[in-house]
Image: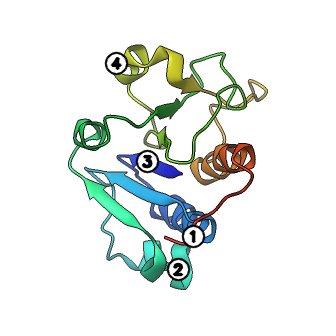
Amino acid sequence: MNIVLLNPEIPYNTGNIARTCVLTGTGLHLIKPLGFSLDEKQIRRAGLDYWKDVKLTVWDSLTELMESNKNAKFYFATTKTRQKYTDPVYREDDYIVFGPESRGVPEEILLENKENCITIPMLPKGRSLNLSNSAAIILYEALRQNEFRMRDI
């Protein structure tokens, strides 16, 4: 599995997601621009001593990532769809894309990929769940569907 963070803004979220990726054998893809430096103490602290084991790729754009993985399936986490994250049938090499914390995946990307937009059901008492929580929830559903086949990458 692969987690994609499009223009992440909060280092602690990225660090928490990196830790989850290490412990599940999941690739982590960061799309520039990042709202922080990967050298910052905050992101290192959030990822603890797991950073050395993260299978991390940093891309200049989402387009670059998608063109480099033309046969892969990309899912887009958003609050702007009715398709639940449990509806798709995930494959082991799929990509799950999360937008920046303050605004989510851009509308034009969602419109181009309507059939692959997924959401976590929640009460309308706030905008969304925390990014690292959302990534873990969706990732573990994808892993469950694939019988928790995790590869040490």
Alpha-carbon distance for marks 4 and 2?
A: 34 Å
Question: Of the residues shown, which amino acid type is indicated by label 4?
Answer: Glu
The quadrant where residue 113 appears: top left
Name the residue that disc number 2 marks.
Answer: 50
Alpha-carbon distance for marks 4 and 3?
A: 17 Å
Residue 28: x and y in percent read: 44, 58
Alpha-carbon distance for marks 2 and 1?
A: 6 Å
Relative to the observer, which residue lies in front, 18 or 91?
91
Residue 19, numbered label: 1
Badge 4 or badge 2: first in the primary sequence: 2
Alpha-carbon distance for marks 4 and 1?
A: 30 Å
Badge 4 or badge 1: first in the primary sequence: 1
Residue 5 versus residue 66 in the image, above or below: below
Q: Secondary structure at mark 2?
A: helix
Badge 2 or badge 1: first in the primary sequence: 1
Residue 7: x and y in percent read: 35, 46
Disc 1 crowd rating (10 Å Cα; few below 14, some 14-19, many 20+) is many
Badge 1 or badge 3: first in the primary sequence: 3
The answer to whether mark 4 and mark 2 are in CB contact below 8 A is: no
Q: Secondary structure at mark 3?
A: strand
Name the residue that disc number 3 marks.
Answer: 4
Number of the front mark, 4 or 3: 3
Name the residue that disc number 4 marks.
Answer: 108
Residue 59 versus residue 43 in the image, above or below: above
